Image (cartoon, helix red, strand yellow):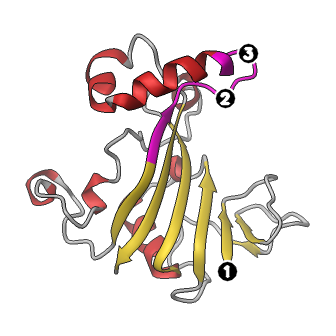
Amino acid sequence: MKKLNLGCGIQIFDGFINLDLVKMDHIDIVHDIRKFPWPIKNNEFDLIYSRWVLEHVSDFTQTIEEIGRILKINGILELLLPYQMSWKWVGDPSHKIIFSHRSFNNYLLENPFAKAYATNYDSKIRFEIVERKIIFSRNKYLKWLGYIIDPIINLCPIIYERFFFFYLPAEEIYFKLKLIKK
């Protein structure tokens, strides 16, 4: 199984190819993912993991197309991203994209609303959502509260996003997606 740690920084995993834009000893591929195409062959990876990276890209659609190009069919894309308007998102002026529970709905195979409002409806990349969850906090002092709040938030995330996230903002969102069509 070939695995990519996309935008790894100093977070290195054994058995992964590590890609980052900064040259360091542990980086296998030095490349700025905002520049296309990436220096990776088509259908190269079974798993792509990325933590707190995609919020920095300027062209999200092209980035997803590139991920789809290098990921094998039935390959897994795992993403940990800052949740919309969390203090972690607004605290970094280099963040360009806000992520919510519905951020990848436009890339689902069955999305009847894609042509009505999506800017990427003509994309050939299609995913199946294996898992997605809003994470209240990973902070060592607030993590205990997440054990209580996370199940409630994720019971009906649309209601949370519509009515409550301004009052009780979560920090992160996790997506596990399976590539099913290119």
C-alpha separation, residue under disc 2 versus residue under disc 1: 29 Å
Residue, disc 3: 141
Closer-to-camera residue (79/60): 79
Range of the magenta residues?
132-144
Three-letter code, disc 1: Met
Q: Position of residue 61 (x, y in %)?
A: 36, 63
Residue at 43% across / 44% down in the picture?
97
Closer-to-camera residue (32/158): 158
Tag shown at residue 138 = 2
Q: Write down the quadrant of residue 39 in the picture.
A: bottom right
Q: Earlier in the sequence, mark 2 or mark 1?
A: 1
Q: Secondary structure at mark 3?
A: loop
Instruction: Name above or below for residue 103 compared with residue 41.
Output: above
Q: Secondary structure at mark 1?
A: loop
Q: Earlier in the sequence, mark 3 or mark 1?
A: 1
Q: Write down the quadrant of residue 126 in the picture.
A: bottom left
Q: Residue furthest left?
A: 116
Q: Are marks 2 and 1 in contact (CB under 8 Å)?
A: no
C-alpha separation, residue under disc 3 versus residue under disc 1: 36 Å
Three-letter code, disc 2: Arg
Q: Residue furthest right?
A: 25
Residue, disc 1: 1
Q: Position of residue 141 (x, y in %)?
A: 73, 15
Picture quarter with the C terminus: bottom left
Magenta run includes residue 35:
no
Q: Position of residue 143 (x, y in %)?
A: 67, 22
Residue at 52% across / 86% down in the picture?
43
